[in-house]
Image (spheres, rainbow, N blue to C red):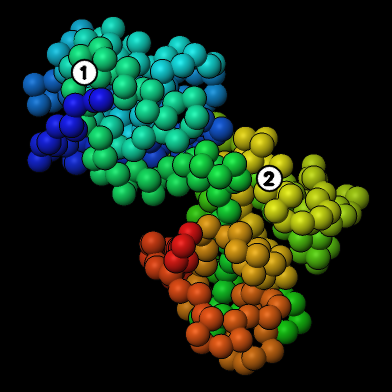
Amino acid sequence: MPDPTPTPTPTDVDLMRAAVAAAASVRHSTSPNPWVGAVVVADGSVVGTGATSPPGGPHAEIHALAEAGDAARGATLYVTLEPCDHRGRTGPCTEAILGAGIVRAVVGVADPDPEVVGRGLARLREGGVEVVEGIAAADVAEQLAAYLHQRRTGRPYVVLKLASTLDGRIAAPDGSSTWITGPEARADAHRLRAESDAVCVGAGTVRSDDPALTIRDWSPPGGGPAEDPRRIVLGPVPEGARVQPAESHEGPLEDLLGRLGGEGVLQLLVEGGADVAGRFHRAGLVDRYVVYVAPALLGGDDGRPLLAGPGAPTMVELRRGRFASVVALGDDLRLDLVLEGS
């Protein structure tokens, strides 16, 4: 039985948030590995900072320890996710931590991966390291939501993205929708694509809008590498469509999610249209709703709604949640909604 978790110090939360900030810089490049940040602190000063490399490269802890060098001996390591204790593409991070002489490890959240869960923390404790768990856990869990969800459920984290007028319309009665939101919101949507392993639309959207579904309006911080997501179309993909190369899926949405989860997809971005959005919503498959709201009104009930199809028949059956984030992007707002039970 491990010793009770030691009491955190007042500065632990601030330093863990520094590790969260380091992880944010690689959010778009590490999948299917988690985007992790690490900070090494010696005598009250940060002597090493690291973030996870693309697959096959060093983990965040290794980068931070290398930057710290000899200063890591007797120091404290802050890391957002439980260090691994198994050999995959790289060696166990626990070995590197113990070998560097770290005496205290502050961890944001445990890793639910079956090959990791609990083993990393136990190995550090066995090696004489004081381990503090759960520091800034809410911040870390928010940042790692897609990874944690996929490891726990076997399915990708589903983000439904929509752009609408203030009166909840995603297209005019004639079907036109270009552009509801401004350039800042569109660039942010492309960043959201870059953070997603795959993006999904309906065949009707491909026929009517011919989207490319690339990240052309967003560049990674520092000019690093970024790849367009896999494109998945619900239904047949027309020859010559700009979305190509794309995969066609026919059948239940649950089957799609199960297959993608098994292939290592951590986050699936659903971009609609309204019919596809309504299907995912009614099936209870959406983990996060991202709605870009423009300060504009179509002013009637004949425009295209956010979600097509039948809704809740009574207010008693209304689904409620919380706004996880509200951000101004130019003249527009980005609203992130997480429903209760998600």
Q: Quadrant of residue 85?
A: top left
Q: Residue furthest bottom?
A: 300
Neighbourhood count class around disc 1 (C-alpha, 10 Å): few under 14, some 14–19, many 20 upward? many
Task: Give me the disc on residue 129.
Answer: 1
Measured as percent of width and height from the top left, residue 24 is found at: 39, 40
In front of the other: 46 or 277 = 277
Circles 2 and 1, Cβ within 8 Å, touching? The answer is: no
Quadrant in which residue 21 is drawn = top left
For the residue labelled by badge 2, is the local secondary structure a helix, a strand or a loop? helix
* Residue in view at x 49 percent, y 18 percent: 57
Report if residue 63 is visible in the image.
no
Q: Is residue 309 left or right of residue 236?
A: left
The residue wearing badge 2 is 258
Q: Residues within 10 Å of mark 2 (few under 14, many from 20)?
A: some
Q: Relative to 87, does residue 197 appear above or below in the rendering?
A: below
How many angstroms separate mark 2 from mark 1 (CA)? 39 Å
Residue 302, position as x, y percentages in the image: 69, 89
Q: Quadrant of the N terminus?
A: top left
Residue at the (38%, 62%) spot, across then down: 325
